[in-house]
C-alpha cells in the first residue's frame, strides 16, 4: 500500500451525500467538477472516486434531491450536469443538522470535560 493510500480518509456512510448536496448548493456541476470541488475545498484531503461518486449521484437523483440535464462543458464536451432541487435543499439542511450533532458528539468523546471521578 502506498503512502497516499494509507493516509486516505474513508468517508462515513452518508457523508458523501452531504458533500455532494453542499457542492450543488453553490451551483450546477458535472460529476468530475463535483469531485474536484470536494477535493479542492477539503485541502486535497478528500478524493472521491468515480466508483463512489456516480452511484451516489444516481441515488440522490432517485430520491429527487438532485436533477440532471445534458449540457456542453467549457471544454466543449457533452456532460451530465447536476443541480439541487427544492427537496434537495431541505435534505441538505437536515443532513447539516445531523452532521453538527454527530461531530459534536464525537468531539465530546475525544475531549471529555473532566468532572468528579471521570477520566
Image (tube, rainbow, N blue to C red):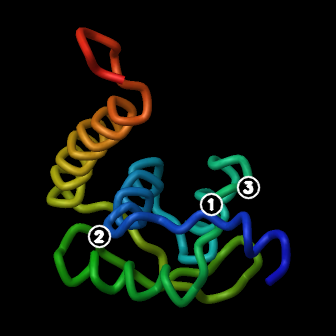
CA separation in Å, label 1 and label 3: 6 Å
CA separation in Å, label 2 and label 1: 22 Å
Q: Which residue is mark 3?
A: 44
Give the residue at x 35% y 57%.
18
Q: Closest to the observer: 46 or 66?
A: 46
Q: Secondary structure at mark 3?
A: loop
**Image location of residue 24, percent across then percent down:** 42, 57
Left or right side of 83 for 72: right
Circles 1 and 3, Cβ within 8 Å, touching? The answer is no
Give the residue at x 47% y 65%.
11
**Image location of residue 99, percent across then percent down:** 30, 45
Give the residue at x 71% y 71%.
74
N-terminal label among 2 and 3:
3
Q: Which residue is mark 2?
A: 66
N-terminal label among 2 and 1:
1
Q: Closest to the observer: 108 or 45?
A: 108
Give the residue at x 60% y 81%.
49
CA separation in Å, label 2 and label 3: 25 Å
Amino acid at each position: 500500500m502506498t503512502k497516499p493510500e494509507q493516509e486516505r480518509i474513508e468517508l462515513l456512510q452518508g457523508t458523501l451525500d452531504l458533500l455532494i448536496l453542499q457542492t450543488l448548493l453553490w451551483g450546477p456541476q458535472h460529476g468530475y467538477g463535483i469531485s474536484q470541488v470536494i477535493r479542492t475545498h477539503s485541502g486535497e484531503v478528500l478524493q472521491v472516486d468515480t466508483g463512489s461518486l456516480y452511484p451516489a449521484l444516481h441515488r440522490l437523483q432517485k430520491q429527487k434531491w438532485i436533477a440532471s440535464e445534458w449540457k456542453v462543458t467549457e471544454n466543449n464536451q457533452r456532460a451530465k450536469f447536476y443541480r439541487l432541487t427544492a427537496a434537495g435543499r431541505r435534505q441538505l439542511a437536515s443532513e447539516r443538522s445531523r452532521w453538527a450533532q454527530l461531530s459534536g458528539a464525537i468531539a465530546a468523546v475525544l475531549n471529555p470535560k473532566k468532572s468528579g471521578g471521570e477520566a
